Image: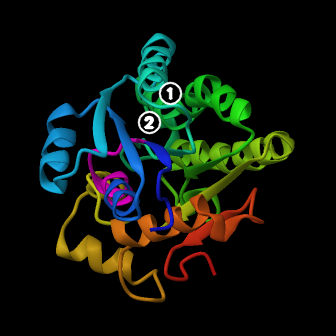
Amino acid sequence: MKLIDKTAVVTGGASGFGAGIVTRFLAEGAKVAIVDLNEAGANALIDSLGTDRVHFEYANLTDSGSVSETFAKLRSRWDSLDILVNNAGTTHLPMQMEDVTEEDFDKVFAVNAKSVFYTSKYGVPWMKKAGAGAIVNIASTAALSPRANLTWYNASKGWMVTATKSMAIELAPAGIRVNAICPVAGETPLLASFMGGDTPATREKFIASIPLGRLSTPEDIAATALYLSSDDAAMITGVALEVDGGRCI
């Protein structure tokens, strides 16, 4: 019970890595808000978890007004915000950089980068008032070891790693720790998009690039998010922790 009586926001918490983080945080005693567009997925997850310590907040994380409204609702429910996990993310399909449409480019940076700006804008002042907090940003191995044909996605995750380190420096005096997790691709709804199709052949090729010989799982990322959010990591801030089975070596 490492998060007993803690409150946590998990963006994109209805599926994939986010759902794994929500599930693990609840098991460790936290109260959790799933902030997502996917109401059906969030409600199905909540029903399966069988606890009143989790609830859903609808938000368009690329819209300032929507995020502001969501945090206002959270303030009316909770006295403090202890943990913020910026997990929501998207990608463009693998293709040459010049063939990515402006619409897809804008979507990738709005979801992967601007959403962190908005959650920080409305969540960080709340944490500052308490003089404590932990922020975990879900980046990617793409930020550290980019793959061809995912250039603009790679760049968005590189942005997140740099933002994490800068946030950590700026927020340390306020007692707020900020860290990033860099997962290798895993069993999430975005997997097929990353690989350009999910077939036995594409999986075999991708897994061959991971020394431990498997994809990451929501449980892997949840365990890391738990550690970075808990008092066990009280002296850790500004790291971009690879959870990648050795792919970045």
- Callout 1 crowding tier (Cα within 10 Å): few <14, some 14–19, many ≥20: some
Residue ranking furthest to the bottom:
212
Q: Is residue 15 magenta?
A: yes
Q: Give percent across and percent down for residue 140.
A: 53, 58
Q: Give percent across and percent down for residue 130.
A: 69, 36
Q: Give percent across and percent down for residue 30.
A: 42, 53
Residue ID at (66%, 35%): 127
The residue carrying mark 2 is 99
The residues tagged by marks 2 and 1 sit, at their Cα atoms, a distance apart of: 19 Å
Left or right of 233 on screen, residue 87: left
Asked which secondary structure carries label 2, the reply is helix
The image quadrant that residue 200 belongs to is: bottom left
Bounds of the magenta span?
10-21
Q: Amino acid at mark 1?
A: Ala
Q: Amino acid at mark 2?
A: Asp
Left or right of 201 on screen, residue 147: right
The answer to whether residue 196 of the structure is visible from this angle is no
Residue ID at (72%, 29%): 129
The answer to whether residue 33 of the structure is visible from this angle is yes
> Which badge, 2 or 1, is on the more N-terminal residue?
2
Residue ID at (75%, 58%): 237
Q: Nearer the viewer, residue 79 or 224?
A: 79
The residue carrying mark 1 is 110
Q: Quadrant of the N terminus?
A: bottom left
Asked which secondary structure carries label 1, the reply is helix
Q: Give percent across and percent down for residue 48.
A: 13, 54
- Callout 2 crowding tier (Cα within 10 Å): few <14, some 14–19, many ≥20: few
Left or right of 134 on screen, residue 172: right
Left or right of 223 on screen, residue 56: left
Vertical comparison of 38 with 164: above or below: above
